Amino acid sequence: MDELSRARAELALLEEQVQRLLKELFRVRAAAATQRAKVDELIRTRPTVFNLLPPEILLFILDLDVRAYHHPKRKYQLAGVCRRWKNIIFDSPSLWTTIHVATSASSVMTHLERSRGAPLDIVIEASLWSRSQHLALVPSLDIVGSLAHRWYKLSITGVYGFADDEEDDFSNDITRTEFIITRINHLQFPSLKYVTISHCDISLDFLSPARAPALEHLEVEESIAEHTDFPPVTALKTLDLDFYGSDMDYPFFPHLIPTQALTKLSISGELSPLPNSIHLPSLKILEISCLAKARQFINAIIAPNLERFKYTSSLSDDPPSVAMHGFRSKFTSVRHLSFCGVELHPDDVIALCEAFPGVRHVELETNVLPHFFDPELSNARTHRPIDLWTELKSLTLCGLHLKWLEPNKLSAWLFDRRALGLRKLHVKLERPSELSGPAPWTDFEFPWLYEVLKEYCILELVNFPLTLPKMYLYMPGNSRLRVHSSHLTTALMDDIAAAFLAGDIGHS
């Protein structure tokens, strides 16, 4: 065979191989297309990771969203996401127990039907109401009123009703709260446990033990004391009272509610009780906020078992030095003290330390802390005012402002505690939650403060990103460090990963 014949034979073989390879290519392409379509179909029909959650966990998440959104239409929006969500929402009575009376009667009936006899949370809220708009509530109110035995919570909130029709006389118009309470005052509420009322200035007969024997928690907002007639709610455990516009000579409190069973009291407004007139033998928690005559009220309180005291005085006529002076015997049982949001002057610090001798857990604004270490403010018994708190175990510093923190004084005090053989103090530093990114006025100075504090206390950080410049999260083996994030996202894990990659997190 000559050379030409050999070349032609070899070409023929190659062309046959090309044909075979082309056929194989077409076959592989077809198989790949089929497989791709199969993968796409599996992806399309596969449940999302969220929908792989057990029904009870998914229901819990949906319930949190519905309650946070505070709108009756939210359930329908979520039900439109997918069939599974729709089935869970429509078949879960707990999602239908909150009844917004201001909605249509048909919506109220739908909620009642789907709640299947579960205890009800009745919400009556609106903005401005005239007399004609009051009457629009009657159908829905009568529907839920017929099921008063199922009421578990009641919230009546809003503002005064204004007449918006020319024929309506504003001076004769009644408040929405008065209109609602008048409609329900004759009903019986055997299961009612929580009540919130705003702009109340009439009799609350429906809260009497005969009408609401299970009532334990009452919140009254923006009400006039001398115009509000309280029944003797003997089983009440928590009470939140906000009174305004009252006669300062009106000694209202002892005549409002028997307080034998009360364990928590939150009070604000304009009040004027008589000295030693408020006996609270079971009270554990007292919160005073924006109270006009704070000293007069504190002088009226007798609470031998008080454990927690929280004070905010932004609108008070009495500074803490006046409000707390001379009341050491009243607060010997207090173990938790909070004065966050209160501006304290040197005289206030002395009064505060002397009034709460047995306190163990304290919350303060960072900017007032230097006063507690000032030896010039102390007395012969201690070197610093803060040393009057001999049983102190933890200190929480709110609204971190490092330029006022003066870490030398803080660390010197912590060092002296150790030298005296006292156990390490638990110090919590709370960075403002609204600061999602770096804050140069704090974050770039914090690593230095951190290095000082970690040796002398058990340090807890709240809302601090782990990627602060030159931040070395190293603690000795016998120490503890806790870091909290206020956002349940992957950001915290990203911070940790970035810190490790950058070598900013040490190992003990």
Image (cartoon, rainbow, N blue to C red):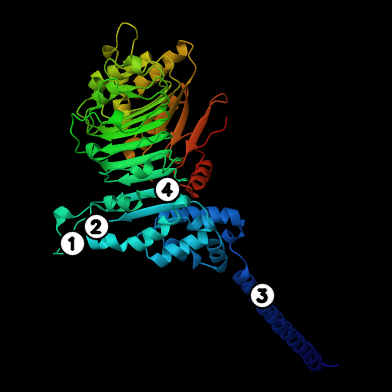
Residue 2, placed above or below residue 68:
below
Dot 4, how many residues are within 10 Å of its Cα: few (below 14), some (14-19), or many (20+)?
many
Q: Is residue 501 left or right of residue 271?
A: right
The disc, 2 or 3, on the residue closer to the chain's N-terminal end is 3
Residue 402 place in picture, x, y as percent = 33, 31
> In the image, what residue occupies the spot 40% across and 32% down?
264
Q: Which label's residue is closer to the chain start, 1 or 4?
A: 1
Q: Earlier in the sequence, mark 4 or mark 3?
A: 3
Residue in the image at 47% along x and 46% along y: 191
The residues tagged by marks 1 and 2 sit, at their Cα atoms, a distance apart of 9 Å
Q: Secondary structure at mark 2?
A: loop
Residue 67 vertical placement versus 387 (above, below):
below
Q: In front of the other: label 1 or label 4?
A: 4
For mark 3, what is the residue?
Answer: 38
Above/below status of 372 relative to 59: above
Q: Identify the image quadrant of residue 327.
A: top left
Give the residue furthest to the top. 380
Secondary structure at numbered mark 3: helix
Q: Which mark is residue 164?
A: 1
Q: Secondary structure at mark 4?
A: loop
Which quadrant would residue 74 be assigned to in this image? bottom left
Rendered position, 180 above or below 391: below
